[in-house]
């Protein structure tokens, strides 16, 4: 027979589906579980931070470049892992879910002879590193913008900017990493739920 | 030393409150389920981060007198 004074509570049931939904869209798992307000808080805060970071970086700081040929990693790695090694920011940004998937699409469909990718255009596409001289065909280089390209290249963003490009990618990484906590919350419940439950039980006992 | 550029309109430091608010709210909401507890914890974390950042800024400001 259970002891009525035993305050050990059973752990909440694990929910892999809710965890996966929160990976796809921050807070979606919590909404699926009926914790709608909390799910919306996660969605607004994390998408807000992620897209605010992208805005600060002129929408050119979430991407996965193919750089293993020019910068091989110190140990032999499969090509995608080598590219991730060279661009570790994406390891954090990835966890924001579907909002980072266009970068994977662009990585798999990158054509250096085109100025933009299929479907997503320049969104989350590896930005041009520098600009070709006038009269020079930019497409003979791997990642150089035509001279009359309207956007800013990475070199221009980093040399002419006021550090907001760097701050922007940090924000996108923080948003992705915070979503790992949100995924865990959807999967296993809040970290201190048991203490909160005990606190409520105690308050109900005192009130009675 | 002139600290005005730090607080000037357009300074990158004006973007920091967004980060402090979001990190403290999201972290606290992953610890608790009840809004009272979430908001109290978020306020505590927000204050801690603000004090930490101000302390770092103060240390750097003092160091400028010796460099």
Image (cartoon, rainbow, N blue to C red):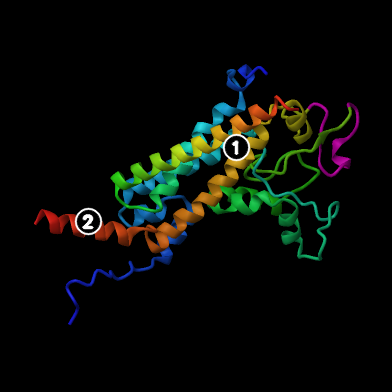
Residue A183 location, x and y as percent? 46, 57
Give whichever of A166, A80 is nearer the camera. A166
Q: Residue at x 81, y 42 (%)?
A: A143
> Which residue sits furthest front?
B66
Q: Give the labeled residue for mark 2.
A: A200
Residue sticking out furthest to the bottom: A1
- Quadrant holding the N terminus of chain A: bottom left
Number of other residues with Cα within 10 Å of mark 2, as a class: few under 14, some 14 to 19, many 20 or more: few
Measuring 76% from the left and 59% from the top, which residue is drawn there? A82
Mark 1–mark 2 CB contact (< 8 Å): no
Q: Determine which quarter of the picture holds residue B16.
A: top right
Residue A128, position as x, y percentages in the image: 77, 38
Element at badge 2? Answer: helix
Using the image as rendered, state which of residue A30 and residue A195 is in the foreground.
A195
Instruction: Identify the residue shown where x is 89% and y is 41%.
Output: A140
Main SS of residues in magenta: loop
Extent of the magenta region? A134-148
Q: CA distance from mark 1 to mark 2?
A: 41 Å
Left or right of B37? Residue A53 is right
Q: Earlier in the sequence, mark 1 or mark 2?
A: 1
């Amino acid at each position: 027979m259970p002891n009525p004074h035993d305050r050990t509570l059973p752990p909440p049931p694990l929910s892999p589906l809710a965890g996966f939904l929160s990976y796809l869209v921050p807070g979606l798992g919590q909404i699926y579980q009926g914790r709608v307000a909390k799910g919306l808080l996660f969605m607004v805060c994390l998408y807000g931070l992620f897209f605010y970071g992208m805005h600060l970086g002129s929408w050119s700081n979430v991407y996965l470049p193919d750089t293993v040929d020019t910068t091989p990693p110190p140990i032999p790695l499969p090509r995608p892992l080598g590219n991730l090694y060279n661009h570790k920011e994406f390891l954090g940004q990835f966890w924001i879910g579907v909002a980072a998937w266009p970068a994977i699409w662009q990585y798999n469909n990158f054509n250096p002879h085109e100025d933009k990718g299929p479907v997503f255009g320049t969104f989350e596409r590896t930005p041009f590193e520098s600009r070709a001289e006038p009269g020079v065909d930019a497409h003979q280089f791997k990642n150089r913008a035509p001279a009359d390209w309207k956007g800013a290249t990475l070199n221009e963003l980093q040399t002419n900017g006021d550090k907001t490009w760097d701050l922007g990618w940090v924000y996108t990484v923080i948003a992705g990493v915070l979503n790992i906590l949100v995924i865990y919350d959807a999967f296993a419940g809040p970290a201190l739920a048991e203490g909160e439950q005990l606190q409520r039980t105690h308050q109900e006992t005192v009130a009675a | 030393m002139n600290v005005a550029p730090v607080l000037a309109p357009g300074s990158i430091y004006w973007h920091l409150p967004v980060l402090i608010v979001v990190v403290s709210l999201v972290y606290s909401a992953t610890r608790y389920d009840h809004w009272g507890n979430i908001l109290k914890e978020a306020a505590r974390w927000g204050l801690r981060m603000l004090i930490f950042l101000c302390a770092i800024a103060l240390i750097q400001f003092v160091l400028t007198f010796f460099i």
